[in-house]
Amino acid sequence: MMNIRQFATTAGLVAGSAIALSAPAHAFSFQTNYTSALTGKNAAKGDIILNSVTLNSGKIISDFTLVTSANILSNDIFTGGNSGAASADIGDLATTGLEQEDLTNAGAAAVLSNLNLNNIIDTEDQGNFILDLNFAKAVDNIFIWERGMNSRLDIQALDANGNAIGNKVALSNSKNWDYAGFDIDTKEISGAQKVGSIGVSLADLGISNAFINSLRVTSNGKPYNGPDFKVMGSVADVVPQSVPEPSALIGLGAVVVGALTTRRRGQQAA
């Protein structure tokens, strides 16, 4: 029998700021509502399907837009063992996705194009990568989960031509994120690890009066401690005709590096 569980984090915004010409931005916490396919010790190894998220306002979002394609701009070369950077990883007993050490564009999409939170991008501890991720539909919020709660990640919006726009947001170490309420045990590790979660709005990314279809995700070596993540977006309610070009965003602090700090709140569940 499927084991359905919901985990609620403490309500309230996560404090943060963006170094940009625009007003300071705030990342947000959310509740992860999910279904575990397995029970007991195997729960962390099996499929963990996202049903919805609940925002601090009480709004429930279940209409997600997933990554349909990826473009690997750079990724440390895999030569065996723990070499390389980003790879595709899945739960030991997961039924979707694939395990792929020498990551390809198709491999990255395979683990990010579904709602299984036990399909992730795994990164070696000192790995460097730059991945451009393209969503099926226009996005108005970004939701990120990180296995281990011990890593950093940078994200930035892209325009329709793949150019970076808005703020490059440097997320804090995921130990400061909220515990998402579940653990996962994937093929890359020997035991279950807690999963953290954080939400990022378009305002955090320095985007105003527009939606995006693409996101750049970056890990910069040892200080980032190998982020192991899942990312998806909520489908934008109203889609504008186009995403603005970088020149239209100068007044919003375009292409200015943003530093986003968060604090961990709420009681962690065992």
Image: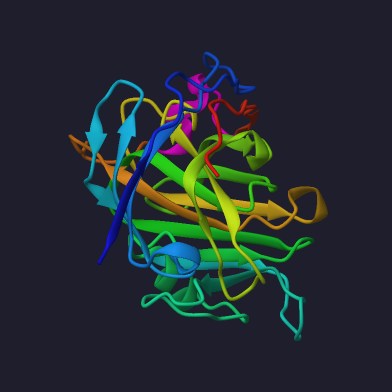
Residue 118 can be seen in this image: no
- Residue displayed at 45% across by 18% down: 12
Q: In which quadrant of the rendered image does the N terminus lie?
A: bottom left
- Residue displayed at 53% across by 17% down: 22
In the image, 34 versus 29, the foreground residue is: 34
- Residue displayed at 39% across by 64% down: 39
131 is within the stretch colored magenta: no
In the image, 265 versus 142, the foreground residue is: 265
Relative image position of residue 70 (x, y in whole percent): 45, 66
- Left or right of 254: which side holds 86? right
Residue lying furthest front: 40
Counting labels gives 0
Q: In which quadrant of the rendered image does the C terminus lie?
A: top right
Relative image position of residue 263 (x, y in whole percent): 62, 25
Relative image position of residue 101 (x, y in whole percent): 62, 80
Residue 17 drawn above or below residue 106: above
Q: Which residues are magenta?
A: 245-255
Residue 16 can be seen in this image: yes
Relative image position of residue 34 (x, y in whole percent): 33, 51
